[in-house]
Amino acid sequence: MQALEYVRTNQTKFQAELEEFLSIASISTQPEHKSDISYAATWLRDRLLIAGFPKVDVMPTPGHPVVYAEWLPAGDDAPTILIYGHYDVQPPDPLEEWNTPPFEPTIVGYDIFARGAADDKGQLYVHVKAIEAFKETAGAPPINVKCIFEGEEECGSPNLEPFVRENADLLAADVAVISDTHILGKEMPSIVYALRGLTYVEVEVTGPDHDLHSGSYGGAVHNPIHALCEMIVSLQDEDGRITIPGFYDNVQELETEERAELAKAPFEREKWLREAGVSTDWGESAYTIVERTTARPTLDVNGIWGGYIQPGAKTVLPSKAFAKISMRLVPNQDPVEITQLVQDYLVEIAPPAVTVKVRDLHDGECAIVRRDSPAMQAAFRAYTEVFGKQPIFVREGGSIPVVATFQRVLGIETVLMGFGLPDDRLHSPNEKFHLPNFYKGIETAIHFMRFLAKP
Ligand code: BES
Ligand code: ZN
């Protein structure tokens, strides 16, 4: 097939373009990177134009822009796909832990190291190159294609749902495609069919109304940092089960059949421990590691601070303590309800000497997608073709809230066609993307479109 040939002969060129894309520090959460975000959006627009899209727009939102592209060469009877990706990235900190600078893409062996390499610039770019391959060989893709690339995914997509609602007609499609997840291994293709939801709160605990000398007041004033730690400890029991009343009320328990199916996926505990960099696992003992990390709800403190943290010692009993707490949610748990439960419980368990404020930072719904759609079949065949092995269906512990938005607002399912690897170090120093997966991803996307056009 000519499109595949085009990919194979242009790998070096594609890699150079990816390096250019990865060198833009499009960090969505940090206002000082606003111009990098705009640059990444226009860079992507230009690449989409080169790939053949006759219509490409950088569309403003109250936050960072959406890059929208459309090419409908296959007529009304042909399927239309909506490709979603995000061109924003997480902050790179802690900087000192990177082996090479996060925005100076570096190739080591077959991996490209940079912030955003796998999450999600490299994976998004797979689709741009697949379309270009059709343009350069067949003249056009065999189906209709729309793209929506957002710049705020890593800060909770605050403006995406309103954007999708307002532009529902523009975005109308038969199915969405997202490459923002990973496969089980280099030679172990997999397709994600479930994602967890998320709720994220910031807790502020106040004790005395100003910082106190710990010599004068320590021992008789409840230290808010201690109080916060006590509260955090009581959010979970020793087995890792969350103790917030009502938290598990609506949780959809795994069916025996699905547990058996999940257990079939290859999983090596030792390898998993090595990847995580820990000596042993932790958590609900009645569930396997795979179940705990993909199908069970969880609670994590993402950060905690307060008092004196500069060099040297300062004797102080601080006035305030803070923590950022997130919870991964599973089907039937409503993020808004869970946030309320957490908030009420934190207020209830606060020791008498402190006051508590809980701020909702963002929510995201979980999603389960259909596995029997024509698009899923096309993806299944495409992976099989490229990886020489049938993909297995897996659940993912991370969250991509737009999948639920597409189901609810546009009434469409999503195919999660990921090409990352489990050790890509998303959100962490030394993030990477395995370059062979980049090229195989492009080939898989080409086959996917071909199979979707002619089932
Ligand atoms: N690409 C990730 C989702 C993901 C995480 C896939 C882990 C596979 C493994 C996505 O960009 C992400 O980080 N999502 C956030 C969602 C949040 C900000 C609403 C997450 O899961 O923390
Ligand atoms: Zn992502």
Image: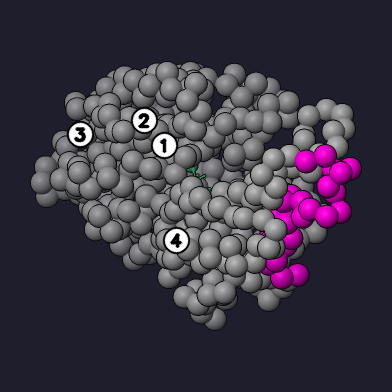
191 to the left or right of 237: left
Q: How many angstroms separate mark 4 from mark 1 (CA)?
A: 19 Å
Viewer-side residue, 271 vs 90: 90
Q: Are marks 1 and 2 in contact (CB under 8 Å)?
A: yes
Residue on which disc 3 sits: 71
Look at the image and give the residue range highlighted in magenta.
212-238
Q: Is residue 224 magenta?
A: yes
Whether residue 325 is visible, yes or no, is: no
Which amino acid type corresponds to the residue marked 1 in the rendered image? Glu
Tag 2 secondary structure: loop
Which amino acid type corresponds to the residue marked 4 in the rendered image? Pro
Q: How many angstroms separate mark 1 from mark 3 (CA)?
A: 24 Å
Residue on which disc 4 sits: 335
Residue at image coords 24%, 39%: 145
Q: Are marks 3 and 2 in contact (CB under 8 Å)?
A: no
**10 above or below 454?**
above
Task: Give the number of the disc on residue 152.
Answer: 1
Nearest to N terminus: mark 3 or mark 2: 2
The quarter of the displayed image where residue 109 is located: top right
211 to the left or right of 161: right
